[in-house]
Image (spheres, grey):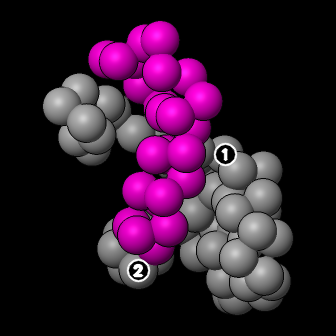
Amino acid sequence: MEYEGAQRLVIVEREALRQFSNPPRADESRLQESVGAICEIAASKILVDGDAPFSPVKVSADDVADWQTSHKILH
């Protein structure tokens, strides 16, 4: 992911991918369906941790749950 001129590797945990909807799946199609939300989550984490412009960003199931709550998308 490129964000404000810095390239960051985004690591999406399997359980994070399964968190996006029912039935829980962690496959390529779920990743493609969820890429917009994953980018939002990663961008918000980058804003919090702006000191490391090239370090990887990990997206966990807790991050997805927090994102869903903030967007009122509960499955």
Residue 33 is tagged as: 2
Quadrant position of the C terminus in the picture: bottom right
Marks 2 and 1, how far apart in space? 17 Å
Image coordinates for residue 38, horizontal then vertical, percent? 48, 59
Magenta: main secondary structure equals helix
Residue position marked by numbered label 1 in the rendering: 60
Residue 67 placed where, x, y %? 69, 63
Q: Is residue 61 visible?
A: no
Is disc 2 in contact with disc 1, using a CB cutoff of under 8 Å? no
* Magenta region includes residue 56: yes
The secondary structure type at the circle numbered 2 is helix
Which one is earlier in the sequence, the residue at label 2 or at label 1?
Answer: 2
Highlighted range, magenta: 34-57
Nearer to us in this view, 29 or 73: 73
Q: Secondary structure at mark 1?
A: loop
The amino acid on which the numbered mark 2 sits, given as a three-letter code, is Glu
